[in-house]
Image: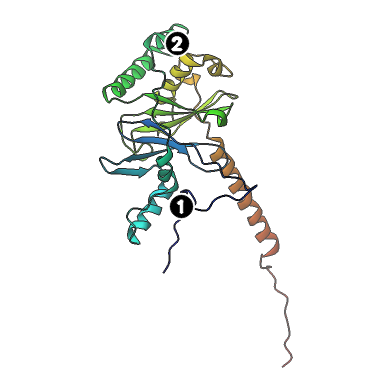
Amino acid sequence: MFIYFPSEGPSSEKPQAGQQVREQPPIFCIDERNGIFVTPKDAHGPRVPLHVKKRMVSGSVACESSVCRDFMRIGVESGNPGLECIHLQRTNRAVCYSTPASLREDSLQSMVDNGLLSKTRQDECVQLRNQSIAGGVDCVFPIIWHEQTSVRFFYFSVFTGVKDSWCQFERTRVSFDSHLGKWHCQCRNKIRSCVHIYLCMWWLFQEKPHILFCQTETNAEDSNVDERVRDVAETEVATLASNDIQELTDYLWRQKRVPENLPQISLNL
């Protein structure tokens, strides 16, 4: 049986005259020590970032996507242990690591003085920031796709210090909707705003305060940030799926339902 594995590698065929060259999704290294990269989850649509790990010295190769992990597992079972998903293939042309702006404690103290952050949250942020420094990695890495960056949605890769299903490489994704002032983190803390969101608020307050104060209300308590926002891409897909299911259900109910009283048909044999 022949199994076809899709590839995103460069084509050997030269583009003909007038033929458009497909733009490759961006990818860049955010952690040169552990070989962590970020790249858009999907080749088209909103550029929601995804973490991948590829460190050839230690032989660590993995993708954050469960679909990609299943894809590569099938490759191993089919006799191709070197198969990589499209996200990992992009690492061959990744932009080299460049140090982002570091978090400064004076800017965090300024947030506390202005009533934007509680003292408890301040201590949590400093503790996790110091843990990332001890590990030799950046605590908050802003994900900027250069000219393709959305003017509304901002994404960050944040150090967690733990490994779990939602942060397999000790990093989580945090998103910010600047129009609504809404935040969302991948972590499991759904009751109140997590420390990962406050770390991103710290970075924005320090580097781009005009973005942070677009719609965000100021309050020193945990209620000042609502993490219930979802990534725009995931929300649109979920809404589309719900509408399709509803339309299909209505159609089956109207057109395919068996009537309660079936007409009697006499057969003349």
From the viewer's side, name the closer residue of 4 and 170: 4
- Return the residue at label 1: 7
Q: Quadrant of residue 131?
A: top left
Q: Secondary structure at mark 1?
A: loop
From the viewer's side, name the closer residue of 157 and 37: 37
Q: Quadrant of residue 168?
A: top left
- The tag on residue 37 is none
Q: Secondary structure at mark 2?
A: helix
Q: Position of residue 189 (x, y in %)?
A: 40, 31
The residue depicted at 41 percent of the width and 13 percent of the height is 118
Residue 190 visible somewhere in the drawing: no
Q: Is residue 221 left or right of residue 79?
A: right
Q: Which of labels 2 and 1 is toward the front?
A: 1
Q: Position of residue 148 (x, y in %)?
A: 56, 32
Q: Position of residue 228 (x, y in %)?
A: 51, 31
- Return the residue at label 2: 111
At label 1, the amino acid type is Ser
Q: Quick one: label 2 or label 1, which is nearer the N terminus?
A: 1
Q: Is residue 147 left or right of residue 66?
A: right
The residue depicted at 37 percent of the width and 14 percent of the height is 122
Given the current orientation, which residue lies at the most extreme top position? 113
